[in-house]
Image (tube, rainbow, N blue to C red):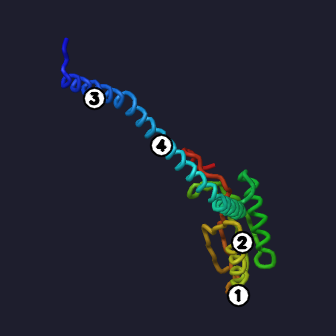
């Protein structure tokens, strides 16, 4: 076969093109794609490390938040009665009320009522009847209001007992203290 110089050049150009095409698609392109994946992987790892260091740099912030949460938890724990059983909590509340009455009012009768849930918290109500004058009663109520324990007066009934001395009154109060126990779903009262 006689191949002319021109045909040799065309054949050489075709073979060169086919070899270049095969090298590009089977060698260069896979290496290029592999390099892009490696770059993306490195970029993702760098972003992860940067976020990690951002979080580490906020360690003081999170420690502050943890300390604030602890102090809030401690102050809330002081607002509730410490006892977990309702009977012991009622006795503790009764003792607290008797300490408030010292020197101000005379407690005539005390009755522990059935514990109940109020707004999801376990409430321990105590009904007391006291005898006092208006000034002593206001002092007694102020002591209840200003105590660190979370106490509420649910009922308040007062009446004059002495026609000659209008200052002398008898008052019936229902004072409620709370135990730091949340209501269980489905439970209504204890």
Specify few, some or many for label 1: CA neighbours under 10 Å numbering under 14, 14-19, or 20 or more: few
- Work out how far the residue at label 2 is from the one at label 1, CA to CA, in angstroms: 31 Å
Frontmost residue, 189 versus 6: 6
Taking 42 as reference, is 89 above or below it?
below
Mark 2 vs mark 1: in front: 2
Residue 91 in percent (x, y) is at 77, 59
Query: Compared to 75, does 31 lie above or below?
Result: above
Asked if labels 1 and 4 touch by Cβ distance under 8 angstroms, the answer is: no
Occupied quadrant, residue 142: bottom right
Measured in 3D between alpha carbons, the distance from the residue under mark 3 to the one under mark 2, in whole angstroms, is: 94 Å
**Residue 157 visible in the snapshot:** yes
- Which residue is at the front of the view, 93 or 42? 42
**Circle 2 sits on which residue?**
147
**Depth-wise, is mark 3 or mark 2 nearer the camera?**
3
* Residue that carries the numbered disc 3 in the rendered image: 17
Q: Secondary structure at mark 4?
A: helix
- Please rate how many residues cluster around mark 3, counting C-alpha atoms within 10 Å: few if below 14, some from 14 to 19, many from 20: few
Residue at the disc numbered 1: 165
* Cβ atoms under marks 3 and 4 closer than 8 Å: no
Q: Earlier in the sequence, mark 4 or mark 2?
A: 4
Q: Which mark is residue 39?
A: 4
Label 3: which secondary element: helix
Instruction: Residue 91: give its label.
Output: none
Dot 2 or dot 1: first in sequence order is 2
Q: Check disc 4: other Cα within 10 Å, few if <14, some if 14-19, many if 20+.
A: few
Query: Percent position (x, y) of residue 145?
Result: 67, 74
Q: Which residue is drawn at the image coordinates 66% and 63% (left, top)?
A: 176
């Amino acid at each position: 076969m006689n191949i002319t110089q021109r045909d040799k050049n065309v054949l050489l150009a075709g073979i060169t093109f086919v070899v270049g095409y095969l090298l590009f698609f089977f060698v260069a392109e896979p290496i290029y794609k592999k390099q892009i994946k490696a770059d993306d992987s490195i970029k993702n790892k760098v972003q992860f490390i940067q976020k990690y260091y951002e979080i580490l740099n906020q360690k003081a912030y999170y420690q502050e938040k943890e300390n604030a949460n602890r102090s809030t938890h401690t102050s809330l724990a002081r607002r509730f009665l410490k006892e977990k059983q309702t009977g012991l909590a009622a006795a503790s509340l009764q003792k607290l009320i008797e300490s408030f009455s010292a020197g101000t009012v005379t407690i005539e009768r005390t009755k522990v009522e059935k514990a109940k849930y109020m707004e999801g918290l376990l409430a321990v109500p105590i009904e007391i009847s006291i005898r006092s004058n208006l000034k002593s009663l206001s002092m007694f109520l102020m002591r209840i209001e200003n105590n660190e324990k979370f106490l509420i007066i649910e009922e308040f009934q007062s009446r004059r007992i002495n026609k000659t001395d209008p200052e002398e009154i008898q008052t019936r109060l229902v004072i409620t203290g709370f135990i730091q126990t949340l209501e269980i779903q489905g439970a209504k009262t204890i």
